[in-house]
Amino acid sequence: MTKQYKQKNFHPDRDTFIHWCPDCNLPLLNIKCTLCHSTGERIDLGPPGDVRFCSPYERSILHDILTHSYGNDPLNERIILLNKIGGEDKTDQVIVDGMMLGILRFDLKNLDWRLDLSMDGGTLIAQHTRSRTIELSDVKGHLNGKSVGSDMVHWCSDDISKGDDVIIRNGKMTGVGTALLDAADMGHAGVPAVRVRKIGKGRARLKMAVPTMDEVVSANAPAIKQLGRNAMNTIKGLANQQEYRGRPVYVSFSGGKDSLVVLDLTRSALKHSPKAYFINTGLEFPETVKYARKFCSDNNIDLLELDAGDAFWMHLPNFGPPAKDYRWCCKVCKLSPAGRITEEGKYLTMDGKRRYESFSRARIPPKEENSLVPGQVNVYPIRDWRAIEVWLYIHWRGLEYNHLYDEGFERVGCWLCPAALGAEYQRMLELHPELFHRWDTYLRDWADSRGLPVGYVEHGFWRWREHPPKMRLLAEQLGIDVVQQDASIEAFRIFVVSGVSPCRAGGYSIEGSARGVTLPDVTDMMRMLGEVRYSEELGVLVVQTLEGSIKLYADGTFQVNGGDRGTTQGLFEMAARQLMKSVKCTGCRICEKACPNNAIRFENGHLKVGDGCNSCGVCDEVCVVTRYMGRIGDGESRTQDLNTT
């Protein structure tokens, strides 16, 4: 996945590294420093390379870790970059003075921050501390990745506990590793005392120059200006095309950094001031709502606020908590309000999406028509910008930004979004305890009703319906069962969120909720649609058809994906019919007699579908349940209109 992501969606000449001026001691967008004309040194980055400046809150996290673990923080007011890389949760490479200090990450197991120092990081910190340090008796040979016995420990600080990250000295070499014993036990001969992660003759040193942000901006001013000109040319070029000339121009303003830059660029590019619209999902941070309104008011920008009201909380009982792979909330709280913009003919919306933000956004084109909102054409003028370029533009232009970024939030979307990081979810408790406790209480009650342990919520497993391998491994380490019990038997009902809409991963999707069904009971019936894979361990049933796929989860929620709008809706209707048949089957056995392939039989009153089924649909045509599906009015079943948009 990562290799494909880099090769097909990113520029190899700028995506996986950045330059650093060795004399001015600051990051460079181009290879030459404007201030001193020195050639920058290359720093390789983990993909996707969306490097950014360390926020004040993240800086405080680093300070606390360094002072608590090593008794000293030598970084002071230096420019620090963070580069997001893959991990369980918030995970960033830390770059200081042109060197990779280590990895800062939020540990979902312990629900706390960790700093894994690199060899350079250990060498640098070792110059300022004797805490958490082990000195070896000048051990010879290759040590990287090996354990060293306590008889080879010459000295160690008395603040070391088993499992601590430690600095290791061995003659002229310095490195980092993990303590395998408490300091008091290091004298036990023959016992492994420390595992060496990496060690060598490091030359890491802090530089004399400590630049300000103003100096960083000045050093990169030509590159920032060129980026701005390119983006404004994109905006002007589209707005002046014959197809769109004279059409209204909007800016989608979320209150975040990217849309702020696009709003400023659009105002600079056009002779007239564009309109801005802000979708208030009802789940926005209070700070974001206040900021969006104030910024537009202070800058005389006409702001259209599209308010979703309590839509999320109204739909929550039917669909349960949203998840990264089940984002019904976006359709209810974002796409539905967006459809209220009424303009005759086509109109342009300038949008701040960037392809570095996620794997799904890596594929965004320069512009595209919004299939959900007729007439809207979305334009992405900064789609090739990295986070550092966004922030440099903001500082260069002196734009007032949403200060939630200073409080440790990498993104400022909905405060309970499942795509948010566990580190940010914990931060919510500190900043908005009343909001945190409302959502946390709901999640715990929801988990309890499905037989899930408290740790399921506490460690963030609620953010997936189908857990990725890294989360399944974490669950195993914590001893947490992440499989939901089948939904309680109740009156059969099917709800659909808000009709067919574009899917983040491509194609179209519908999310729904089927009450009164259990996975084992519907497995055979769903075989009439295509190939079925059922995992009791994961609590998910997947149906793969020629038209698309259906995923049904143990709690009754399900998702349908297809290549186009009509196909997806048709597949959803077929899935609804099969679920209805599984619950309402009368046992008349007409389908068994009608099946041309003899693939249907009844055993002990239950329908069984054999391998001979080719999804011909004859059984649907003769089934009394599907024939009178719209008339089953016994007060126990209800299906929401599938054409809802």
Image (cartoon, rainbow, N blue to C red):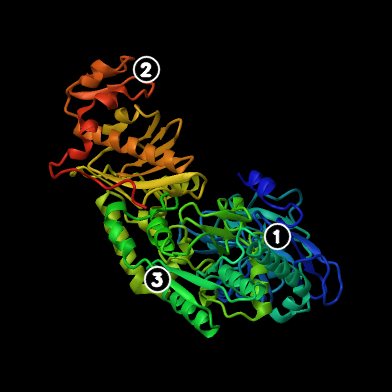
Q: Residue 639's spot in the image, x, y percent?
A: 25, 45
Q: Earlier in the sequence, mark 3 or mark 2?
A: 3
What element does badge 1 sit on?
A: helix
Look at discs 1 and 2 and give the one toward the viewer. 2
* C-alpha separation, residue under disc 1 versus residue under disc 2: 61 Å
Q: Callout 2: 10 Å neighbours few (<14), some, many (20+)?
A: few
Which amino acid does the dot numbered 3 rest on? Leu
Q: Taking the image as drawn, is residue 122 in sight?
A: no
Q: Which residue is mark 2?
A: 612
Which amino acid does the dot numbered 2 rest on? Gly
Which amino acid does the dot numbered 1 rest on? Met
What element does badge 3 sit on?
A: helix
Residue at x 62%, y 53% (from the top left corner): 365
Q: Quadrant of residue 230?
A: bottom right
The mark found on residue 429 in the picture is 3
Q: Callout 3: 10 Å neighbours few (<14), some, many (20+)?
A: some
Q: Which residue is mark 1?
A: 119
Q: Residue 97's spot in the image, x, y percent?
A: 73, 70
